[in-house]
Image (cartoon, rainbow, N blue to C red):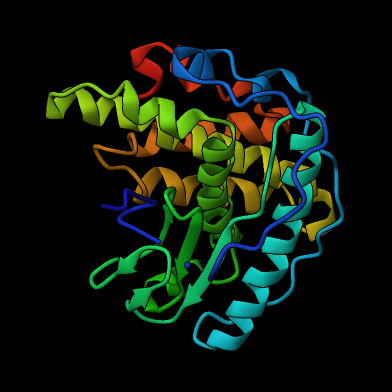
Amino acid sequence: MRKIIPLLVAGLVAPLLAPGTVHARPVPTGLSALTKNPIYTSGKLPVRSCPEYSVTIEDFLTAQNYLREGAECLDATWTSFFKKAKLPFRKPGMEFISKPTKTRACGNMDGFWGGAYCHDTQGLVVLVDGWMLEYEGTPFLFYVLAHEYGHHVQQRAGIIKAHYKLMPKSTKAAYKWHARLELQADCLSGAFLRSIWASTGRDSHDWQQLLTYIKEDMGDPTHGGGKSRAAWTDRGFKAGSPSVCNTYKAPASQVA
């Protein structure tokens, strides 16, 4: 059975393969993959030009093009970073849809909204429909994409496999444990957005507006509270690096 990692509930196109990193080190396993991962010690993400194009949520074609442009930037940034970290990397599969439907990577997605990553197929989905309308004109759609891509980063770095292997059996403890994975994806999305922010033409007001949306609308038991999600997203943004995204060593108060 495929494990789906949702943004709010859930999220895909067939995997696009990229050449593996030459002389890559073995992907870490076990607790070390979570707490001592090479992505924490490989510096900042490369600054890249990624102009943000106009998008109309009600026009699926423009939204799809917007996401494709963003995906290209994500591919280039994380491919370069994994090469520096000496870890093998390939691009995720992606699918952008306008209504819940059956997807190649995640199967039947009826009833889902937002974005999802399915790690067994290494593919992600973003749903663009009416729920996004209130965020039009903000970088929220880019954040959704970057968050789901963050799960792919975790997959390629060995974090997701270790996360599920070490997940507690009780539901309450599992929710708290899973929030660490989701908050880390938020932090990774913030680090990426910082690396391309100067080229988007957006300012600090846009960033604070995004954090407000996350804080007010994005909290749930398996992902962490809205306040924590905004804090980890902002933490990654301020650093521009995965080095500050080690949620597995963070105190419980920071991942609630």
Residue under the point 75% across and 66% down: 52
In this rendering, position of residue 117 left or right of residue 67: left
Residue under the point 52% across and 20% down: 33
157 vs 203, nearest the viewer: 157
Residue 175 appears in view: yes
In this rendering, position of residue 87 left or right of residue 59: right
Query: Quadrant of the image for the C terminus?
Result: top left
Choose top left, top right, bottom left or bottom right for residue 242: top right
Whole-percent x and y of residue 25? 71, 24
In this rendering, position of residue 69 left or right of residue 4: right
Whole-percent x and y of residue 196? 78, 50
Residue under the point 76% across and 45% down: 79
Whether 120 is drawn above or below 83: the answer is: below
Whether 2 is drawn above or below 105: the answer is: above
Whole-percent x and y of residue 88? 69, 37
Residue under the point 15% across and 26% down: 172
Residue 231 appears in view: no
Whole-percent x and y of residue 152? 55, 46
201 vs 187, nearest the viewer: 187
Choose top left, top right, bottom left or bottom right for residue 85: top right
How many marks on residues? 0
Choose top left, top right, bottom left or bottom right for residue 70: bottom right
96 vs 165, nearest the viewer: 165
